[in-house]
Image (cartoon, grey):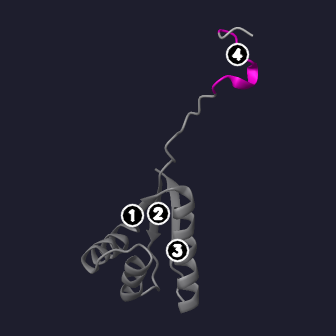
Amino acid sequence: MSPDHRPEWEEETKLELKEPRPYVVLLLNDDYSTWDFVIEVLMKIFHKNRQDAESITHHVHNQGQGVCGVYTFEIAQTKVQQVHQLAKSRGYPLRCVMKEA
């Protein structure tokens, strides 16, 4: 076999890697979850410092929703589930959603 002709199985395969699509995680306002609980959620689940957690909580309260962070699909999905589980365990109706950025 000549060096210019390679068998089909020897041909190089080019892999095209794409960056994962980002997803925004939003916390939604409600009339029942306490200010302190929302701050706790932001600090524990989203690893926000106290000042950032208070700022986001204020925004959620005034605007109806606030950005907790931007993540890959799997991480965003996990964060949403963690918020819902913690809220349910504490008796709060706090909701969180994810949207493609």
Q: How far apart are the two marked residues, 1 and 2, measured between alpha carbons?
A: 6 Å
Tell which tag, 4 or 3, sits nearer the viewer: 4
**x 40%, y 63%: residue:** 69
Give the residue pinned by disc 3: 95
Residue under circle 1?
67
Q: Report how far apart the C-alphas of labels 1 and 4 lie in the structure.
A: 53 Å
First-in-chain label (3 vs 2): 2
- Give the CA distance from mark 2 to mark 4: 49 Å
> Relative to 77, is 101 on the left or the right?
left
Task: Please name whichever residue, 88 or 10, is drawn nearer the observer in this view of the structure.
Answer: 10
Name the residue carrying label 4: 6
Contact check, label 1 and label 2, Cβ < 8 Å: yes
The magenta-colored residue range is 4-12
Q: Say which element carries label 1.
A: strand
Instruction: Classify mark 4: residues with Cα within 10 Å, few (<14), some (14-19) or many (20+).
Output: few
Q: Residue at x 75, y 10 (%)?
A: 1
